[in-house]
Amino acid sequence: VPRMILQPLIENSILHGFSGQRRGSGKIWITAMRKGDCLTLSVEDDGCGISREQLDEWNSKWNKLSETGGGKIGLTNVMRRVWLLYGEQAQVSFSAGHKCQGLKITFCLNTQNLRACTIRPNNGQTPEL
């Protein structure tokens, strides 16, 4: 799993999904499954969630590279990283989380589309992705 894909989503669950809840009362589930060339990653919480209208809007909007944003910096950055590494065929879906509460974000990534990406920091070392 490439770096900085899951962390911003988990951070969003904590900051937005559990705001106003008693400390320690929320749960986050992280799952990863690989079947052939398909890697499925999901982050799910049992927080406050979003409305059905927002789910529908996000599901239609977030799979289009030109339409990301709208103040959602963490999710925008994650989507750009995913598209950079896996191509624009990578898909994201949003659904109600655990027991119809919270939010579940699921990525479907075709590992055959994983692009070779080398980032060289100033010290010349190549970090793992």
Image (cartoon, rainbow, N blue to C red):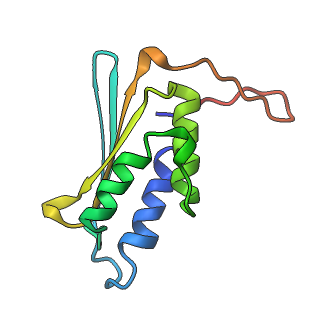
Give the answer, above or below, for where 50 lies relative to 128.
below
| Residue for point 34% across, 48% down | 59
| Residue for point 28% across, 68% down | 51
Q: Nearer the viewer, residue 66 or 126?
A: 66
Q: Position of residue 13 (x, y in %)?
A: 40, 64
Q: Quadrant of the C terminus?
A: top right
Q: Position of residue 67 (x, y in %)?
A: 53, 47
Q: Quadrant of residue 120?
A: top right
Is residue 106 toward the left or the right of residue 127 in the image?
left
Give the answer, above or below, for where 31 lies relative to 38.
below
Q: Quadrant of residue 52?
A: bottom left
Q: Position of residue 85 (x, y in %)?
A: 55, 27
| Residue for point 42% across, 20% down | 111
- List the single residue furthest toward the right: 122
Is residue 78 toward the left or the right of residue 29 in the image?
right
- List the single residue furthest toward the left: 99
Is residue 97 toward the left or the right of residue 66 in the image?
left
Q: Nearer the viewer, residue 89 or 39?
A: 89
Asked whether residue 13 appears in the rendered view, the answer is: yes
Q: Position of residue 91 (x, y in %)?
A: 38, 35
Number of numbered discs overlaid on the protein picture: 0
Give the answer, above or below, for where 17 lies relative to 111.
below
Give the answer, above or below, for where 30 lies relative to 27.
above
Asked whether residue 44 appears in the rendered view, the answer is: no
Q: Quadrant of residue 33?
A: top left
